[in-house]
Amino acid sequence: MVCQACGTPIAQGVHFCSKCGAQVGTPQPMYAQPPMPMYLPRVHRHLQTLGILWCVLGVYRVVSGLMAMIFFRALTTHNFSNDAWMFGGRFHGAIPPMWMAGFWPFIAVGTIFTAALALVAGYGLLNRAPWGRTVAIIAAIFALIKFPIGTALGIFTLWVLAPGASGLEYDAIADRS
């Protein structure tokens, strides 16, 4: 065999020319393709982001639910059982029916349920728990009706975690941890 760069005879099994240092063996194409970047599958790329977003949504639901309960309670009981409205004087507007005062416990239970579900989904995804994918998919389905933030997060979660290939990938991640 002969070196293609300088013409020096080369022994079999040698990969570089001893005279000029050129690589010998299989000829390299003039325009070689660059190496392909390492591809990370969908679940690997987005799992951390999903976990953080679900935790943020859980905290947001707690805060917004508490504000809704306070507002609804103040509205239905006329400033917490006081006949004077909060800005002084009497409240001369339409008085909400007293049966509406019974709704605030339902708001409280709904808030606690949705916030807990979002926080558990976020915790499960961040810790790569085997049950995290299932809880996140259930939370995503419930979140679809909370436009626009819940809808966006629900669609993103279902896009990442719902396909069958994502289930296999998540199971591989959960088994390693």
Image (tube, helix red, strand yellow):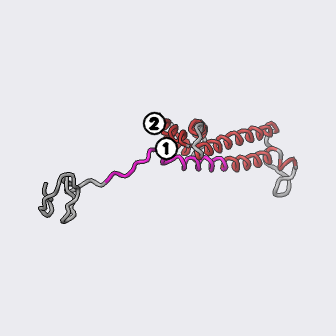
Quadrant of the snapshot with the N terminus = bottom left
Q: Nearer the viewer, residue 88 or 104?
A: 104
Identify the residue shown where x is 54% and y is 49%.
48
Asked whether the viewer can see residue 142, the reply is: yes
Is residue 75 highlighted in magenta? no
Asked whether the viewer can see residue 141, the reply is: no
Quadrant of the snapshot with the C terminus = top right
Q: Nearer the viewer, residue 105 or 157?
A: 157
Identify the residue shown where x is 69% and y is 49%.
64
Q: Taken as a whole, is the magenta stretch helix, strand or loop?
A: helix
Crowding near the residue tagged with mark 1, few <14, some 14–19, many ≥20 C-alpha atoms within 10 Å: many
Residue picked out by circle 2: 165
Residue picked out by circle 1: 43
- The percent position of residue 33, horizontal first and vertical second, equals 27, 53
Tell me: 48 left or right of 81.
left
| Highlighted range, magenta | 35-59
- The percent position of residue 53, horizontal first and vertical second, equals 58, 49
